[in-house]
Amino acid sequence: MEITRRDFIKTSLAASLATAIPGNLGLHAGGTDAIRIGMIGCGGRATGAALDCLDAAAGVEVVAMFDLFRDRLESSLAELKGKHPGRVTVTADRCFTGFDGYKAVCALPEVNLIVTATPPGFRPVHFKAAVEAGKHVFMEKPVAVDPVGVRSIIATSDLAREKGLAVVAGTQRRHQSRYLEMMRRIHDGAIGELVGGECYWNQGDLWVVRKTPEMSDMEWQCRNWLYFTWLSGDHIVEQHVHNIDVINWAFGTPPVKAMGMGGRQVRTGLEYGNIYDHFAVEFEYPNGARVLSMCRQTPGCADRVEERLVGTRGSAFGYGEIKGAVPWKFEGGETNPYVQEQADLIASIRRGEPLNEGRRIAESTLCAIMGRMSAYTGRAISWDWAMNSSKLDLTPPRYELGDLPVEPVAVPGVTPLV
Ligand SMILES: NC(=O)c1ccc[n+]([C@@H]2O[C@H](COP(=O)([O-])OP(=O)(O)OC[C@H]3O[C@@H](n4cnc5c(N)ncnc54)[C@H](O)[C@@H]3O)[C@@H](O)[C@H]2O)c1
């Protein structure tokens, strides 16, 4: 007999709760030692992040997994078990699929850290469920695809702080020695007052999942999520948020305005959904400084993934160099930043001083969204309006593996600003 996803979740949840270890296993930060991970999303990055957690510290186990699709869950489980047989204790009754499976993972008392790396359109809902259930969270960037989602992330981050829960976002540059050292110098005045800068994520193409006759619209979009704005936020949000976050870090504040342009010139086939393939955005900071942001996913063109900050006394480069009055070059000696961010998260939980990166990644996500909104509509966007007044909410009418027509590609000057 075919077991439906919903039945599977119900039965497995009941079974898990029946065998749950009693007592508070560190749902709150203070003094927690054992880290028991529940995964929300089991794709490439979630699997990588779980492995990074296992590499980051002793006393860490993966105990539960959830993915929309069983095949993704199974391949992730096989990889995790292959690499860490003794530390991956996921049993069949702690595996969940379907849209609602996150609720079952969050309900498991033995899970105290949620690692989530689904397409970012789902992040606000998954993050809220995790924090409401009292779990620490590692969540991948970006953390939303629209201003409504960003506000939800900020509210949930505030709730996490009240509950003493840790929140670390996958902006690994924030845990990388060359960036930490460079920022310390910038904030100490090594390049003077910031007057401008540039940031880039220009690269070739990424993977594509083509629709097969058996796939519903929703299944295809969720598998090919990079190319649908409601799922990825477009590549300015999905990838370039890393570089925009570095610029915000340097300025110590998000920008006040974004004005951008972009389009879809090369990736025009149906398989590329409704996102653009290039953007250029100018961000204006509160002191009047303007920063150019550029991102492109087009094969056969010049690649550049980098940040440069210009000050009154010199320039700083994200790869670890300062030129000008107080020159400096990063000398090396850096740990893997993907492992370091997990080490920092786990150490903060164990110290009882939980990190909370929720607001700042929400703010950087909103900057990238502002750039996209400006390019899509042709309008200049102010921070205050985007943060406080925009009603844009890209959530589809229902989460069901059925029909879901693809929204049209945005046209500047025509697409309305919402
Ligand atoms: N920090 C970094 O450097 C970095 C690198 C790569 C990816 N990422 C981020 O990680 C996230 C995931 O990217 P990825 O490369 O792992 O993609 P992926 O396609 O490999 O994984 C996404 C997974 O989510 C699953 N999924 C889709 N909808 C779901 C839902 N509603 N509920 C549960 N699972 C669902 C998919 O089946 C898939 O297994 C993205 O936000 C991406 O931007 C960050």
Image (spheres, rainbow, N blue to C red):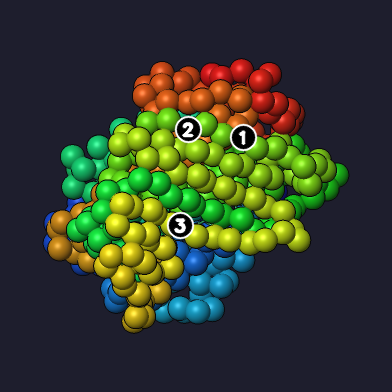
Element type at mark 1: strand
Q: Is residue 139 visible?
A: no
Q: Residue furthest right?
A: 213
The amino acid pointed to by label 1 is: Met
Q: Which mark is drawn over residue 261? A: 1
Image location of residue 181, percent across then percent down:
28, 67
Image location of residue 82, percent across then percent down:
54, 78
Cα distance in 3D space between marks 3 and 2: 17 Å
The amino acid pointed to by label 2 is: Ala
Cα distance in 3D space between marks 1 and 2: 10 Å
Q: Residue at x 66, y 20 (%)?
A: 413
Quadrant in the picture for residue 289: top left
Q: Nearer the viewer, residue 343 or 192?
A: 192
Residue under pointer 3: 307
Quadrant in the picture for residue 315: bottom left
Residue under pointer 2: 258
Q: Residue at x 50, y 60 (%)?
A: 306
Q: Residue at x 37, y 61 (%)?
A: 316
**Count of picture labels:** 3
Element type at mark 2: strand
Relative to 290, residue 199 above or below: below
Question: What is the crowding at mark 1: few (fewer than 14 residues within 10 Å), some, or many (at least 20)?
Answer: many
Relative to 417, residue 123 above or below: below
Q: Are marks 1 and 2 in contact (CB under 8 Å)?
A: no
Relative to 177, residue 357 above or below: above
Image location of residue 340, percent across then percent down:
34, 69
Q: Residue at x 38, y 69 (%)?
A: 320
Cα distance in 3D space between marks 3 and 1: 19 Å
Considering only order in the chain, which callout, 2 or 3, is on the residue closer to the N terminus?
Answer: 2
Q: Would residue 11 be found to the left or right of residue 299 on screen?
A: left
Question: What is the crowding at mark 2: few (fewer than 14 residues within 10 Å), some, or many (at least 20)?
Answer: many
The amino acid pointed to by label 3 is: Glu
